[in-house]
Amino acid sequence: MLILMKSEATKEDILRVCQKIETMGFRAHEIPGAQRTAIGITGNQGKIDPETFATMSGVEQAIPVTKPYKLAGRDARKENSEVSVGGEIIGGRELAIIAGPCSVESWDQLITTARAVKDAGAKFLRGGAFKPRTSPYTFQGMKEEGLVLLREARAETGLKIVTEVKDVLTLSAVSQVADVIQVGARNMSNFSLLEAVGELRTPVLLKRGISATIEELLMAAEYILAKGNLSVILCERGIRTFEPATRNTLDLSAIPVVKKLSHLPIMVDPSHGVGMWEGVTAMSLAAVAAGADGIMVEVHPNPSEALSDGYQSLKPERFKDLLEKVRRVAEVVDRSVGAEVA
Ligand code: PEP
Ligand code: MN
């Protein structure tokens, strides 16, 4: 159930409703909106009588939620959510541009890439320190050492850091460096990890599982929201289909579907979506045209030497060219891209 408060409801009205929910033995989740606050109720097994709240001061309406997700849905919040990452907004008019190597490999590799993507207009640097690899025999990431390099790259460039958490065990180390914690496709259904990042207040970039439906993605987001972390950004990164020509099938139709069902921002990762650098620019432009709130692109100074995902990584010059094109498409859909630095 959702309690929709009146626009003129006071803080005390909201508090009284939350207290009432808690005394009933349920959990109250305040979801602030531009016009009004909604309060989600979780923890109830059966139905709750809407009359319980109808006469309380400041309450507009109590509505039952028909969808399995309560806090991620549009009913909870009419406006699009904007996630602030230390002042950089994801989900606003300006597109979020996240770029960097698949894995952190060395200081030289990381800082060369960071400077190049920043000059091109990116505000976020990606790079995995803990890598969930399909094979146990391939490069597993620089781990803690990689986190140190990411921290240094932020100090040097001012870029916000997006890095993946592989498990609950290493979450504390990752969260000390990450401005945005990435939960990868393979972990979308790792519910203990989702709950653990939900306990934090660091923004989370939640990638769609390899074979997950859009509803499953929203339910995964719900795990994080239900623990009180409202800073969730979704990411479409391709799903597995019968088509072997691309690494995955980038499901761009997920963007309008998510926009209809949810208030959460949605980004697109074209690199894992197609798995070959030749397809990355086309899919980035298509993603922006389709209404994505940003793109996450793998960039490497020397893709043929990359320790992971070299084949789908762009060279810095190509990334610069991509962003110039993205700028033009962004204008058509009334969005913008941060200024080029150099
Ligand atoms: C990545 O971003 O490098 C990654 C491992 O992505 P995904 O979880 O989408 O496969
Ligand atoms: Mn990768």
Image (spheres, rainbow, N blue to C red):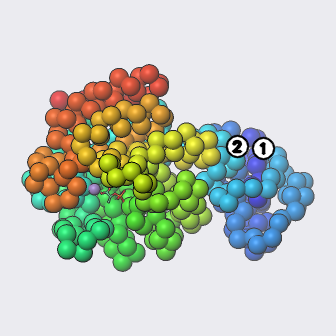
Pick whichever, 209 or 7, lies toward us.
Answer: 209
Determine whether 241 is above or below 250 in the image. below
Pick whichever, 191 or 19, lies toward us.
Answer: 191
The earlier-in-sequence mark between 1 and 2 is 1
Decide if residue 325 is on the left or right side of residue 301. Answer: right
Pick whichever, 29 or 135, lies toward us.
Answer: 135
- Which residue corresponds to mark 2? 36
Q: In the image, what residue occupies the spot 24% across and 43% down?
A: 277
- Which residue corresponds to mark 1? 6
Identify residue type, mark 2: Arg
Pick whichever, 101 or 137, lies toward us.
Answer: 137
Give the image location of residue 65, x and y in percent.
75, 55
Decide if residue 123 is on the left or right side of residue 62. Answer: left
Is the Cβ of the residue at disc 1 closer than 8 Å to that at disc 2?
A: yes
Which element type, helix, strand or loop, lies under badge 2? Answer: loop
Ligand 1 within 8 angstroms of badge 2 C-beta:
no
